[in-house]
Image (cartoon, grey):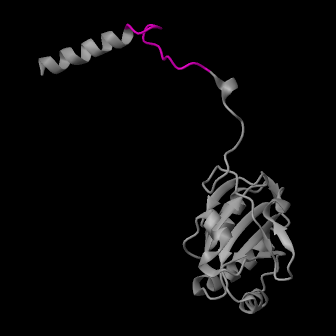
Amino acid sequence: MKAALYFIVASLLLYSCKPGGGKSSVTDNSAEISNEIRTGVDVGERAPELVFESPSGEKIALSSLRGKMVLIDFWASWCPPCRAENPNMVRTYKQYKDKTFKDGNGFTIYSVSLDRSKENWVAAIEKDGLEWESHVSDLKWWESVPAAIYGVTQVPSNFLLNGDGIIIAKDLHGHFLSDKLHALLK
């Protein structure tokens, strides 16, 4: 016990003898710290760009929605949990599409389908009343490029972005999506 105590006291003495008298040797080099936000799929990172085709063949860029709160929603027509979530998505979209948020004006959804069949994809959009404009897919099922970019391994999955394209939440389903949006209102 005495040996341990001597070791601790000696360590403290050695530490206090460092240049700067035991003060932190970390300097303030904040001028060197970049203000750029890293691109990635974690909360706090800028969402990677997606540019894929709509059912009509129009290319829609995720970045074209900047300024709004955006939910990137990965889903598929063949996915029962996705289809069960769609009424909530429609309700939330209608409730918040014209609202003003702390970090965005309006709310929209960028739907990314993991379908293989364009017919099934379009039929599900119509049947479920997914009235927002941004629906995209490369029709590659689990080989979907957007899903690979975002590391999506299950559907439904989603990412909530602020008006600057920064991911602020992930996998918000049911009332959790509307609760989060409500908390972000201006």
Q: Tell me which corner region of the image, top left, top right, bottom left or bottom right, holds residue 176.
A: bottom right
Percent coordinates x, y for residue 141 in the rendering: 63, 81
Front-most of 52 and 10? 52
Left or right: where 120 falls relative to 141: right
Is 138 located above or below residue 18 in the figure?
below
Q: Is residue 127 magenta?
A: no
Residue in the image at 14% along x and 18% along y: 3
Percent coordinates x, y for residue 130 in the rendering: 78, 82
Is 17 located above or below residue 114 in the figure?
above
What is the quadrant of the N terminus in the image? top left
SS assignment for the magenta stretch, majority: loop
Is 160 located above or below residue 44 in the figure?
below
Front-most of 41 and 100? 41
Q: How many marks?
A: 0
Highlighted range, magenta: 17-28
Left or right: where 109 falls relative to 9: right
Residue in the image at 78% along x and 51% along y: 164
Is 163 located above or below residue 149 in the figure?
above
Q: Is residue 18 magenta?
A: yes
Left or right: where 6 falls relative to 129: left
Q: Tell me which corner region of the image, top left, top right, bottom left or bottom right, holds residue 86.
A: bottom right
Percent coordinates x, y for residue 10 in the rendering: 25, 12
Left or right: where 158 falls relative to 17: right
Front-most of 33 and 158? 33
Q: Tell me which corner region of the image, top left, top right, bottom left or bottom right, holds residue 79.
A: bottom right
Residue in the image at 13% along x and 17% along y: 2
